[in-house]
Image: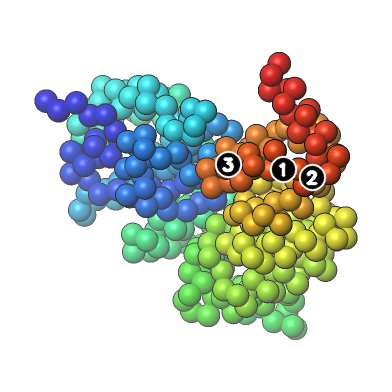
Amino acid sequence: MTQLETLSQFLDTANTQFQVYDLGRRVENIDPVLFNQIEALNTPYPFPIQGHAQFAIVFWREDQPPFIWFLKLPLDEQGLLSPAQRSQFIKMILEALGRDPTKALSDEEQERYANHPFSFKPSQEKLALFNALVKKQLSQQASAQYEYAAQYFSNLNETNAQGDNWQQLGLQGIADVCVRLDKFDHDKHINAAITLAPLEVQAAICQCLEHVAISDTLANTLFDKLSAAEVEHKHIYLRSLASQPELTQKAIKLLVNYQQLDENLLITIAARSWTALKDDATRKLYLEVLANQPQNFFNQVFADIVAIPSLRDSLLLDLRSADRSEKLSSAIGGLFRAVSQ
């Protein structure tokens, strides 16, 4: 009997189709070829968070509803999956299910399996967006909340600016609309809602938009809202620009110029908008502001972003750059001292 060493091998031998989604930073598909490379330990996990890969595997057979695993697996110092823990999970699966991941379990088995050490529970907004995205990609019907949310946004106008029944909106319905921006004028309606809807609704929209690609028109509306918002609300709109790195870079420059890039916004950029930091000038601005925060905060945020493979080499070069302020040099020195302890 062939020994199963990867999750892909297990699901392939079980004759299932499957898709993988990152749920650590943004909710997004992981290309099957890339996931195979990750599992073969040939490439680091692209979206690490707190030293782990947090992802969902959705798998199914023909004419069967999909099954979902939410997995949190540790990464080594190079960002590669830890093979020992992955093997432990596969062993546990084989003991519980044999070679059929769609096998029915008793209530006792389900309870024991649901609490295994490699599972995690996504946040409410990520789970809503994930559910919406999976249903769309598998051509399944949206949730029961979708119709009400779509109707709410389509009816929103200047004379009904607060949307009389906005409290009845569900986050799942908003997520269903946001993953379907290319249908039924949803993009136009969401664009209007960013101006007309109550702040609570705008915040929920932005929580969903951070995980999807948005149009330039909608992005510009969100940028304008970010520019005009009170400091305590700016992170709401900044996070929604995650799919627009160039506009995020412009936003970061604006926030720095007005000395508004606070701890909350620094965390938002690291967690959701890290692709903007691929730009050398933007990354330098970010690090200089980060260096003005308490040393422990600097250390934690730097450790988080330097673990991201697409930023790692650039950030390591920044540590040795002669073109840095005395404050940043001091913060880097504090980082080294903390690491060496």
* Label 2 secondary element: loop
In which quarter of the view is residue 138 placed?
bottom left
Amino acid type at circle 1 is Ser
- Pointer 1 residue: 321
State left or right for residue 6 relative to residue 228.
left
Q: Give coordinates of residue 246: x percent, y percent.
A: 64, 65
Which residue is depicted at the point 74% across and 29% down?
335
**Along the line of sight, the residue nearer the viewer: 252 or 158:** 252
Say few, some or many: other residues with alpha carbon within 10 Å of mark 3 (under 14 / 14 to 19 / 20 or more).
some
Amino acid type at circle 3 is Arg
> Are the residues flagged by discs 1 and 2 in contact, CB closer than 8 Å?
yes
In which quarter of the view is residue 68 placed?
top left
* Label 1 secondary element: loop
Which mark identifies residue 312?
3
Label 3 and label 1: CA atoms lie apart by: 14 Å
**Along the line of sight, the residue nearer the viewer: 200 or 10:** 10
In the rendered image, the residue lying farthest to the top is: 341
| Colour scheme in use | rainbow
- Pointer 2 residue: 324
